[in-house]
Image: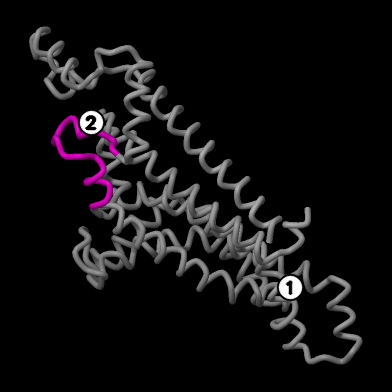
C-alpha cells in the first residue's frame, strides 16, 4: 500500500506540473499571435482614445508578466475572467457547454468499443480469415477518412436525403447520433488494431500453450485467460483516445452546429476572445490530464508489475 501511495503522489505531482506548463504556454502563445483584441471589440474604425480605454479595461495594456500573474491567480480560483464580446463569465460559459461535449465524447467512446472489441478479438482468434481481413479493411478505411468528410457524408445521406436524423442543432438525443458515430468510427479503427495486436500477443505466450497442453476448452483459453490480460493495455490507451475525442469534437461540433465546448472555443478563436480561448483550452487540458491520471492510477493498481517497477 505504501508503494501505491508513493506512486499516486508522484503521478499527482506530474499532473500539476503538466497543467501549469500548458497554462503558461497557452497564455504566452496567444500574446505572440498578431492582432489586438481591443480592436476586435471596439472595431477597426474606433478612435485611438477609445481603443486605449478599452485596453485599460481589459487589462491588455499591462506588462505580459503582470497579466500572467493575474491570469494564474485566477486559474487557481477557477476564474478565467469574462468574455471580451458578451461580458459573461468564462467559467459559466464553459460549464454550460461542456456537458454536451462530454456526452458526445462518451457516446463516441462507447461506439468505438462496440465496434473494435468484437471485431478485434475475432481478427486475433481467427487469423487470416474473413473476419481478420474485414477488420483490417475497416481499420484502414476508418483511419484514412477525415472526420469532417465523413460527417458531411452522413449528413447528406441520413439527414438531407433519408431524413432519419435532424440536420443541425443539439436539442434532442437524435442530434447526437451522427456526431457520436463519426467520432466512434475514427477511434474504433485505431482501437481495433490495438485489440488485435494485444490479443494475438497473449495467444502466443507460454501460459496459453500450457493451458492448451492441459486440454482446457478453447473458449476458456481465449476468453477467460487470454482476453483478460489482452485488455489491460487498453486501459491506458483508452485515456489517450478519450483525449482525442475531446479534441476532435471541436470540428465535429462545428459541422453539426452543436452548441458544445468545442464550438465555443472555435468561435472565440475567430473573434480573438482571449479569455474564452484560454479558459476553454485550459479546461480541456485539465480534463484530459485528469482522465489520463485516473486511468494511469487504475492501471497501476490493477497491474502489480507497474508498482514493483
Q: Is residue 140 visible?
A: no
According to the picture, the residue beneath numbered tag 1 turns out to be 128
The correct choice, above or below, for 190 with respect to 70 in the image is below
Q: Of all residues shown, which one is farthest toward the front?
A: 2
Residue 77 x %, y %: 32, 39
The way the protein has been coloured in the rendering is: one colour
Q: Quadrant location of the N terminus?
A: bottom right
Q: CA distance from mark 1 to mark 2?
A: 52 Å
Toward the viewer: 194 or 9?
9
Query: Is label 2 in a helix, a strand or a loop?
Result: helix
Does the magenta run of residues contain 137?
no
Q: Of all residues shown, which one is farthest toward the top?
A: 48
Residue at image position (50%, 73%) is 114
145 sits left or right of 11 in the view = left
* Residue numbers of the magenta segment: 79-96
The correct choice, above or below, for 68 with respect to 156 in the image is above
Toward the viewer: 174 or 209?
209
Toward the viewer: 295 or 216?
295
Magenta: main secondary structure = loop
Q: How many marks?
A: 2
| Residue 158 picture quarter | bottom left
The correct choice, above or below, for 255 with respect to 59 in the image is below
According to the picture, the residue beneath numbered tag 2 turns out to be 271
Front of the two marks 1 and 2: 2
Residue 73 x %, y %: 35, 30
Query: Is label 1 in a helix, a strand or a loop?
Result: loop
| Residue 51 picture quarter | top left
The correct choice, above or below, for 306 with respect to 57 in the image is below
Amino acid at each position: 500500500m505504501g508503494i501505491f501511495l508513493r506512486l499516486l503522489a508522484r503521478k499527482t505531482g506530474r499532473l500539476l506540473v503538466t497543467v501549469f506548463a500548458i497554462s503558461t504556454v497557452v497564455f504566452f502563445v496567444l500574446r505572440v499571435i498578431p492582432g489586438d483584441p481591443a480592436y476586435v471589440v471596439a472595431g477597426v474604425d474606433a478612435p485611438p482614445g477609445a481603443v486605449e480605454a478599452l485596453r485599460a479595461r481589459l487589462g491588455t495594456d499591462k506588462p505580459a508578466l503582470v497579466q500572467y500573474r493575474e491570469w494564474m491567480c485566477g486559474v487557481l480560483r477557477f476564474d478565467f475572467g469574462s468574455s471580451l464580446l458578451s461580458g459573461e463569465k468564462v467559467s459559466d460559459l464553459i460549464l454550460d457547454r461542456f456537458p454536451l461535449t462530454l456526452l458526445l465524447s462518451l457516446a463516441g467512446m462507447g461506439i468505438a468499443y462496440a465496434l473494435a472489441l468484437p471485431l478485434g478479438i475475432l481478427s486475433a482468434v481467427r487469423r487470416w480469415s474473413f473476419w481478420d481481413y474485414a477488420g483490417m479493411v475497416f481499420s484502414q478505411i476508418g483511419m484514412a477518412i477525415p472526420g469532417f468528410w465523413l460527417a458531411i457524408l452522413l449528413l447528406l445521406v441520413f439527414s438531407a436525403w433519408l431524413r432519419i436524423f435532424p440536420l443541425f442543432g443539439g436539442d434532442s438525443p437524435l442530434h447526437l447520433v451522427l456526431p457520436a458515430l463519426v467520432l466512434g468510427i475514427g477511434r474504433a479503427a485505431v482501437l481495433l488494431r490495438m485489440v488485435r495486436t494485444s490479443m494475438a500477443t497473449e495467444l502466443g505466450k507460454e501460459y496459453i500453450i500450457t493451458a492448451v497442453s492441459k486440454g482446457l476448452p478453447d473458449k476458456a483459453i481465449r476468453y477467460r485467460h487470454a482476453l483478460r490480460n489482452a485488455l489491460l493495455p487498453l486501459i491506458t490507451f483508452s485515456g489517450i483516445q478519450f483525449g482525442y475525442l475531446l479534441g476532435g469534437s471541436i470540428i465535429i461540433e462545428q459541422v453539426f452546429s452543436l452548441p458544445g465546448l468545442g464550438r465555443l472555443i472555435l468561435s472565440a478563436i475567430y473573434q480573438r476572445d482571449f479569455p474564452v480561448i484560454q479558459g476553454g483550452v485550459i479546461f480541456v487540458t485539465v480534463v484530459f490530464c485528469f482522465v489520463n491520471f485516473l486511468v494511469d492510477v487504475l492501471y497501476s493498481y490493477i497491474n502489480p508489475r507497474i508498482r514493483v517497477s
